Image (cartoon, rainbow, N blue to C red):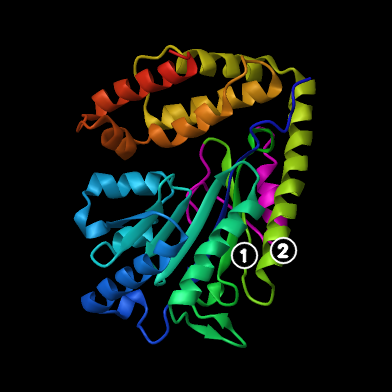
Amino acid sequence: MTDLKKHMIVSSRVRLARNIAKIPFPFKMSPFEAASVIDKVFNALKSTGEYNLYKLNELSDIECLSLKERYLISNDLIKNRNIGAVILNSNETISVMVNEEDHIRAQCVLPGLDINTAYEEIKKVDLALNSALNIAYDDELGYITSCPTNLGTGLRASALCFLPGLSTLNDIGKIVKSFSHINAEVRGVYGEGTKATGYLYQVSNKTTLGITEEELVEDVKAMVLELAEKEVKARERILNMCDPDIIDNIMRSYGILTNAYKLTTDEFMSLSADARMGACLGYTPDIDEQKLNTLLLDVQPATLIVKGGKNYTAEERDIARAALVKRMLNNN
């Protein structure tokens, strides 16, 4: 029997919200104050390594959308495009949004279940910021943030989970409901207010006040492992069912992915999810997890255009997407 835990945790993320004392929140700041915050944050980070600064008002719409597709910036930062910026390290595992909802939203994203390492990496960023800047902090409330739900640690830990078993058996709704009664949320791939696509769900803590950062990280890790065990049992049930329709759908999905001439984004997300499930259950050839994770980002519409260096029409984009997927999965 194949390893049923394979491909389950796509990535881990730890995010911190911080503000500089005595400077208005982004929704009230002047352009001069916004520019000053960008400079202060960028200079503070220089002690921790090499970073690149991108001011959103200097980027095209497509470039901004590509950054969002790759989980490096948010919709809120795009809305604050005239005053916002993002600071990235060389391999883009660390992203620091400036002048989003708060002055600073710093995150570290790593592959697999590696929340502890992501936390250690973002703490280095946090120490640099606290050393160089007058970060807003209250002895009772903790870090001061624009939204009260981020008061305290200002920390959100999360994991992007691939849950085809629970989704196929229609058990995911019960899981979401059960997690709502504890300090946890199960949401769509792009976070709050978004739907799950490709059997992908984001699991994170719900509150940040009244608990230490280390406790939050361990709590989220425990919740993800609990969810993983439920997913394993769901996959075992599917394997025991030997449902011809499920197996046929998996095989057809893999065949289309590796042979199609055109693919829309939605088609790729649906087909790749089924093919990945097939690999988990042993029905399809062993698909390289890293290739699928890379494709999840690279086939998105704006990212295809940015990486391809061409302003494709919708049809040209679908053709380019299919060619990229075929090349990656067929090892050509």
Residue for point 37% across, 49% down: 68
Residue 59 visible from this viewpoint: yes
Residue 187 colored magenta?
Answer: yes
Considering the image in quadrants, where does the C terminus appear? top left
Give the left or right position of residue 14, taking residue 76 as reference.
Answer: right
Residue 105 colored magenta?
Answer: no
Q: Are marks 1 and 2 in contact (CB under 8 Å)?
A: yes
- Mark 2, Cα crowd under 10 Å, few <14 / some 14-19 / many 20+, is few
User: Which of the two discs, 1 and 2, labels the residue nearer the N terminus?
Assistant: 2
Residue for point 66% across, 54% down: 116
* In front of the other: 263 or 22: 22
Give the left or right position of residue 166, taking residue 328 as reference.
Answer: right
Specify the principal SS of the magenta part.
loop
Residue 284 point in image, percent of width and height: 62, 15
Residue type, mark 2 in image: Ile
Residue 93 point in image, percent of width and height: 48, 48
**Tag on residue 227?**
none
* In front of the other: 222 or 313: 222
Residue 183 visible from this viewpoint: no
Q: Please name the residue that numbered disc 2 is placed on.
A: 182
User: Element at badge 1?
Assistant: loop
**Tag on residue 206?**
1
Residue for point 56% across, 57% down: 121
Residue type, mark 1 in image: Lys
Q: Is residue 257 above or below residue 90?
A: above
Q: Which residues are magenta?
A: 168-197
